[in-house]
Image (spheres, grey):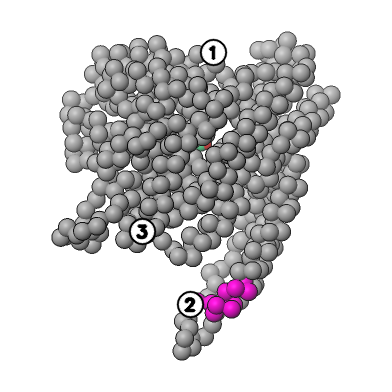
Amino acid sequence: MNSPTDDWFEGDLSPSEFRRLGYRVIDMIGEYYASVRDVRVCPQASPGDVADVFDEPLPVEPRDPDGILDQWTQRVLPHSTHLGSPRYFGYVNGSGSMIGTLADALAASVNMNPGGWKPAPAATEIEKVTLRWIAEAIGYGTPAGGILTSGGMMANFTALTAALRNLAKHDVTRLGIHAPDGGRFRVYMSDHEGHVSIPAATDLMGIGRDAVVRVPSRTDLSMDVDALRSAIVADREAGDHPLAVVAQVGSINVGIIDPLEQIADVCAENGLWFHADGACGAVGGMLPEKRSLYAGLNRADSVTLDPHKWLYVPYECGALLVRDPERLRRSFSMSAPYLRGSIPAEDEGLDYYDYGPQMSRGFRALKLWMTLQHYGVEGYQRLLRQNVQCAEHLHALVSQADEFEVLHEPVLYIYSFRFAPASLREQEPEATEHLDRLNQEICDQLRRSGEAFVMSSRHRGRVVIRLSICSHRTTPTDIDRVFGTIREIGQKLVS
Ligand SMILES: Cc1ncc(COP(=O)(O)O)c(C=O)c1O
């Protein structure tokens, strides 16, 4: 740290020292990006090992910045999982654009807080225009507004809270969640592919995880809309309050898109909020060849979309798009004299704390705004298409290999399949538990090898191998390599 001088302040680095350290950091990041294609995808260390690496007392004496930066290379990187690797296929985690990295550094430098317009005029207007661009790009249409969130979970929570605050017959904001007649609020999603963030959201809202009604799905795992209609009728007859339907737009295990047009009809007929959870897949609306799957999305009251997933923007960046932003304001607006002043002033801009549950907020929009300009719609279309082609390529490999079982057609970039040699498949259901353990072991061994990061999931109750191929760096060659290793591990395990 510098000592205070006439023209500098304790607590800041001098301009020349800042530049020297900054160039050093850029070199560190540049070296990382140069090696990211070949890096060991995740560390071999256990949680306890990693905890030991960082377990040290609170620093009391100031430390030298070079020594602090050394720790990045010595301790942080060796114990990191590399979501930017082209062979990282875990959860639904994005790869992170390079320009987004630079944007994050710039955003941090001015330290804007787009909770309110006054502390962040440019950031607020950039967030507005960026949300409008995304809505247009995916075919949600304009006018639309919304808010950037920490991720899909918070976007879903914000949407369903807005549904409750806008549609409940009593004033939930003031009186709380209990309907005066004792009826329970109900939120509908498909049974197999509905995402865990929905019951987590209803739990946070105080209407309970059991508020989520699992609607039976069809053979392709999309929602059965006849079953949805029946569930709504049954709940009304029981005195409950149907509130919202959550459609999956790119589901977690198979990337399915629910029948959006039909769900929109049901919501319109019943006065329900139509929320599309497109955390994984809404971005696919940018592909003209996939657009027909998205018919009806433009009728959703709200759409979740995660730029930190399939738009390759660095964490954190989720988005909620809404048809009518006033419904967000009605749900979240706060007033206090220290926020806006008690006397109305001219030129009040949008205060984003009125649109969601967060007050202070980071300048997430910058990395999204810059990444959208960097790739443009055309660049995105090429990259998204490459991900879809990788999933199709994997499907072709699985279909052609006897030891594997095809479970579904690829829709977008998420693909699940099973290692199930004919000799074992013929012995099902007795052999199912053994096959479950085999598939789990394949994923675990692959991860331990450092070659790729793949996780298991369940498809109709059976353990499966699941790849989420949403890295802008993944090519069919990576898919060949990973499939070859999966096959090798599987063959060794059964031999
Ligand atoms: C369909 C769906 N919705 C919501 C989420 C939650 O998103 P986040 O992890 O960004 O909070 C996910 C995460 O994978 C998801 O797949």
In depth, the one of 339 and 77 nearer the eye is: 339
**Residue in view at x 78 percent, y 27 percent:** 487
Does the image show residue 90?
Answer: no
Residue 385 horizontal/vertical position (percent): 62, 32
Instruction: Say few, some or many: other residues with alpha carbon within 10 Å of mark 1 (under 14 / 14 to 19 / 20 or more).
Output: few
Alpha carbons under labels 3 and 2: distance apart: 26 Å
Q: Which residues are magenta?
A: 12-21
Which secondary structure lies at badge 3?
helix
Q: In the rendered structure, which amino acid carries the disc numbered 3?
A: Pro
The residue beneath circle 3 is: 121
Question: Which of the two discs, 2 and 1, labels the residue nearer the N terminus?
Answer: 2
Q: Is residue 321 left or right of residue 109?
A: left
Which mark is drawn over residue 11? Answer: 2
The residue beneath circle 1 is: 219
- Residue 385 in the image: above or below residue 42: above
Which secondary structure lies at badge 1?
loop
Foreground tag (3 vs 2): 3
Q: In the rendered structure, which amino acid carries the disc numbered 2?
A: Gly
Question: In the displayed image of the protein, which residue is found farthest to the bottom?
Answer: 6
Q: Quadrant of the N terminus?
A: bottom right
Instruction: Say few, some or many: other residues with alpha carbon within 10 Å of mark 2 (under 14 / 14 to 19 / 20 or more).
Output: few
